[in-house]
């Protein structure tokens, strides 16, 4: 009978009738020991395990390769691209190593920092490339230690291009990728997952195709976990290579590198670098249209789609690796046409998850940073535990300071001129600020005809969920309740709900209504009188820039405002209103008035003084309606406040 | 404006506009640091703080004094009394120290173990008395260390009665209670709250009333936190004493000791021991009715009530300490008539909370021990953290073994003869066992006319909540689904609901339907077929005594089955179905068949063999319906199973 079932695990056989010893231990797993529920089993797995699981389940996957940009602005754009392309569900991304660009440094554009951002701030499983030739052992060890410290778990071990024309092997030096693989395994045991490069046509410098296969086998036997190949132009090239690999005993995953042709010049350059030959039939198509970028890209997409289909149909290929050239359109198009792009990526939690191993059990955050997840991750990067690091104690500030405020990934994506168009070239009073907030909510253009698509506290347009509150938000912003964060109450909607759902299917999600806004002290005075009537129902925190703090929260305990109930899981409460962290958030929220908005204007200008006045005199308020099964009372609270003022 | 509000806390003044430093730390508290939500602020407070808070809020309280019993059976009864009288909401109980009874030993009847049980297993704030005369410093330190280790936090420091008639002070010895107070403060700093005795008429051995007051002042100045007085017969006695204490500078709380007269002989004995004189007007009433126990008790209750009223009405008394003489009726009656007995003690959590300081953040338990909370506390006593100790890992058993199975507080309260009447003098087959389970559910007498008020897995009658399921439970037990634990699904009832509510008011409580039962392998085979239809909805664990374990639970993660949402709090999920601990529970649950039931019968007797057969062959099953907002499907699952069998 036992054998009939799907999941059978046999515990120790204890038939002692005196109560015996606890026999549960043998069938337990380490994972059951962790103190937080885990929605996303992936977060605990190594890349090679994820790959294996996808292969076992027959679930096709893709990955994306990027190179580090040259300028800080380009880096900001690339990171937005990580966020957008990350939404399609790549199994991992990888970041190339540019020896000339100080790749292990702390520069905004270094390979190391770009990979760090991808892992920690974009939540992407990331492979960092690393080359070894012309480098000392100490340098390489230093890079690897730094990568580990930053939370990187995967390395693509490469030889790299020798610096000079005449390259000679150094005795005891790192002459080949295999030396790097061995070094990583010697120094870091099994910590990193290691990827190596395969050459479907053989490495251009290898004595022969066969010799190159033997080198590849050496790399794998030295400890590499999987192989990504150089680009190729025909599926047969890869499939033959794969069979040859298997024939000489290479059993690890081999992932084909796909290069969607995106333009004439990029193709020529790549071919030159890789010393590959473009098949005549491709040349025949491209040459006549070489000045028509769109036509070449369309052809490239077609070609890539049909080659990928052949690869997937062969049954030998489970994942596809894309050389994106840091571009978005062609690769996304290919992936969508192949049906492997996730169109509806379910949120595992209602906020972006970091892929840093130490954050893998993180399952709760203060709601204040809902629109600034990267800032939250940055400010909590020194925490040792999640969620038990939590929000500070009386002796030490738990939140990292904002001293690196200009850190590039916290910058607004829009340039100054665009911000001025949205937020006003010239402000004439507090009302013109109300107007900006109102336009952001409604989506209507401002009086100069520009839509307000971002705010200092929200770099993105209004969330779909917030749209549910649009009408009320518009009304209150117009009157000086300047909202920066809100959510409706939800009483048990399915976790698959397209607007408010999150987490695995079969669950139910809940929310308490939340409203956070800046407002004048006059309104706060009236609001506090009104709130007396709601004492048991509404929790509030009201604080000004000086830290004067008014609250009715009991014992400074956090108030859960989003939670989910799932089959076979513990309760997850991803967002809370935490009184302690609110005071850290307050500093950031008030600073944004000055840093992002006031500083757009000349010093001493009336516009700047208006923002400065608001910064100095307004209060930041948050309200929670605890009675989530009833109709949201926060709008009534605001209405009552305005009525009292009249 | 800020001053208008109820709660104002001022954070550090940070007006730096560059984002500044995190200024939240100064207004935060240690309590916000703990990783678990706390429903009951009391649990974090020291006794003296609780006393102070009650005094400040004008909330009258009471406490109860018990002495250690002489026999193990009497100890079992006393512990049931702790549970019953604990429900009335005493601020604390205290346990006297009997030097002749080996009070610091591990005997079931020692003062130390009785106090340990009160704290750890009954969840009562407890004061352990301790006397010092005729004892060595090392002995006393040893007792105190042991008390601390067991989680006791309060000591009543007493001199005790000298052993011989002729008592002489020892130089450097412990001659007076003040020596013990000093010793505790020297050796344990501020760890313990210390109580000392006050004598409203002066200590019988003191030179004078005034000299005794000076001794009391010495004890307080040596570090005592509050005073409990010797009994007295008139409120004026106490009020005068209190004023005299205040006059010489004693400012700590002074709690009157109340002795409801319960019988002629106990009064005479107490008077002899305490060397007090009974006022003539009381003697005049009692002497004529000295052989009528009921009349004396009624008079004692009247007298105590009117004296307590006078004390409370004086405005000087906030708490009343009762000398219970280990009896229940008189004291409970007085407390009820005074209106200080809590008639509806809201559960802070859906299970008994231990008062051990290390368990004060405990907020989740496996549901399996719902009816055996003392066993759960006992088996997890070695855990260092709550809730993060959780339920074990693969290498070490997390649950203490059941080797001390006969530990007195795990015993059934009913004697063998009574159990035989309930569970059958002679069993004729599995059906007679079904009949016992059915009678326990229905409350109807069995065929011999005896009600079944307890079962090996439930020492108490059916919970009110379980009554909601009575009809269905009866039906399935009759057919061999032998239920030992169940709860209905609840979709957001108010936390004040009289049947399923718990926690502070203003909240909402939820449950997933749960059913746990023993059943034959034949029924399990059919059940597993039926469960295939419910794969996504119902989680199950099915295990036999040998540990063969069948489950569809993902990754051995716990499944929350009871949770509550409260104003200004994090989510609380007090009970879960945890796959790992289920295997520890399984050992206990199967062992109860043998230990509590089979062993009632002669070895080799047919009755014993029937129970042994069930123990050896039945499965223990638990089912959770994850769709708590829908109608409970578990009854349908069981119906389908029976249908399949027919």
Image (cartoon, coloured by chain):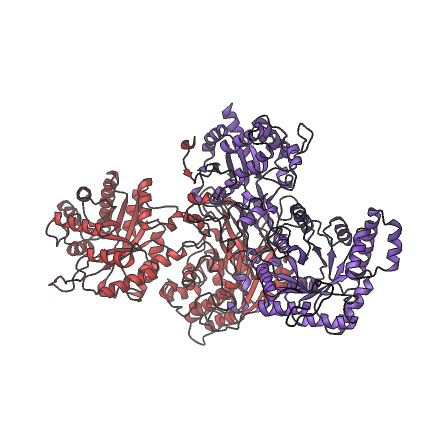
Chain colours: A red, B purple
Front residue of A104/A605: it is A104
**Image-based side of B524 in relation to A202, left or right:** right
**Image-based side of B544 in relation to B603, left or right:** left
- Figure quadrant of the C terminus of chain A: bottom right
Q: What number of labels is visible?
A: 0
Front residue of B3/A293: it is B3
Front residue of A232/B123: it is B123
Q: As displayed, is residue A592 above or below residue A299?
A: below
x and y percentages locating residue A170 in the rendered image: 14, 63
- Figure quadrant of the N terminus of chain A: top left
Residue furthest to the bottom in view is A604
Front residue of B343/B122: it is B122
Residue B1 visible here: no
x and y percentages locating residue B535 in the rendered image: 45, 36
Q: As displayed, is residue A315 above or below residue A588?
A: above
Residue A233 visible here: yes
Q: As displayed, is residue B370 above or below residue B116?
A: above
x and y percentages locating residue B71 in the rendered image: 66, 48
Image point 45% across, 32% down: which residue?
B532
**Image-based side of A515 in relation to A59, left or right:** right
């Amino acid at each position: 009978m036992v054998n009939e079932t799907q999941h059978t695990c046999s515990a120790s056989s204890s038939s002692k009738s005196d109560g015996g010893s606890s026999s549960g231990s043998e069938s337990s797993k380490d994972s059951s020991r962790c103190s937080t529920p885990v929605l996303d089993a992936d977060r605990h797995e190594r890349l090679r395990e994820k790959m294996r699981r996808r292969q076992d389940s027959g679930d096709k996957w893709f990955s994306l390769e990027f190179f580090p940009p040259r300028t800080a602005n380009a880096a900001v754009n690339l990171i937005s691209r990580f966020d957008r392309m990350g939404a399609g569900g790549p199994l991992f991304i990888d970041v190339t190593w540019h020896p000339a660009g100080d790749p292990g440094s702390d520069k905004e554009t270094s390979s190391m920092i770009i990979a760090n951002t991808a892992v920690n701030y974009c939540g992407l499983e990331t492979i960092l490339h690393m080359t070894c030739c012309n480098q000392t052992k100490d340098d390489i060890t230093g890079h690897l230690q730094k990568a580990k410290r930053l939370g990187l778990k995967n390395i693509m071990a490469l030889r790299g291009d020798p610096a000079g024309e005449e390259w000679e092997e150094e005795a005891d030096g790192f002459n080949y990728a295999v030396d790097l693989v061995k070094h990583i395994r010697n120094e870091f045991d099994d910590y990193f997952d290691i990827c190596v490069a395969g050459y479907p046509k053989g490495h251009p410098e290898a004595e022969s195709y066969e010799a190159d296969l033997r080198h590849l086998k050496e790399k794998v036997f030295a400890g590499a976990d999987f192989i990504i190949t150089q680009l190729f132009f025909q599926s047969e090239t890869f499939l033959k290579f794969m069979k040859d690999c298997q024939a000489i005993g290479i059993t690890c995953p081999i992932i084909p590198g796909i290069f969607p042709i995106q333009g004439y010049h990029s193709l020529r350059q790549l071919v030159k670098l890789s010393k590959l030959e473009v098949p005549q039939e491709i040349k025949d198509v491209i040459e006549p249209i070489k000045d028509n970028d769109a036509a070449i890209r369309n052809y490239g997409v077609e070609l890539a789609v049909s080659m990928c289909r052949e690869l997937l149909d062969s049954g030998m290929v489970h994942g596809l690796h894309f050389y994106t050239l840091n571009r978005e359109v062609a690769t996304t198009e290919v992936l969508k046409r192949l049906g492997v792009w996730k169109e509806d990526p379910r949120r595992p939690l209602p906020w972006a998850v970091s892929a840093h191993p130490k954050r893998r059990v993180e399952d709760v955050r203060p709601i204040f940073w809902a629109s600034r997840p990267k800032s939250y991750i940055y400010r909590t990067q020194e925490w040792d535990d999640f969620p038990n690091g939590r929000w500070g104690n009386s002796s030490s500030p738990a939140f990292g300071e904002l001293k690196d405020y200009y850190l590039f990934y916290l910058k607004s994506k829009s340039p100054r001129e665009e911000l001025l168009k949205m937020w006003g070239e010239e402000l004439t009073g507090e009302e013109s600020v109300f107007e900006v907030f109102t336009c952001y909510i409604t989506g209507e253009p401002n009086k100069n005809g520009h839509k307000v698509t971002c705010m200092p506290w929200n770099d993105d347009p209004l969330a779909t969920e917030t749209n549910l509150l649009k009408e009320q938000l518009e009304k209150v912003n117009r009157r000086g309740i300047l909202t920066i964060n809100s959510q409706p109450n939800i009483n048990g909607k399915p976790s698959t709900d397209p607007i408010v759902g999150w987490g695995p299917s079969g669950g139910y999600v809940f929310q308490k209504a939340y409203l956070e806004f800046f407002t004048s002290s006059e309104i706060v005075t009236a609001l506090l009188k009104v709130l007396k009537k709601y004492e048991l129902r509404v929790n509030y925190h009201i604080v000004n820039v000086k830290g004067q703090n008014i609250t009715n929260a009991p014992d400074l305990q956090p108030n859960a405002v989003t939670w989910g109930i799932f089959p076979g899981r513990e309760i997850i409460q991803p967002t809370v209103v935490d009184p302690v962290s609110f005071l850290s958030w307050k500093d950031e929220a008030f600073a944004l008035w000055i840093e992002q908005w006031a500083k757009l204007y000349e010093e001493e200008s009336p516009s700047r003084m208006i923002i400065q006045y608001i910064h100095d005199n307004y209060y930041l308020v948050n309200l929670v309606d605890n009675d989530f099964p009833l109709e949201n009372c926060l709008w009534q609270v605001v209405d009552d406040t305005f009525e009292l003022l009249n």
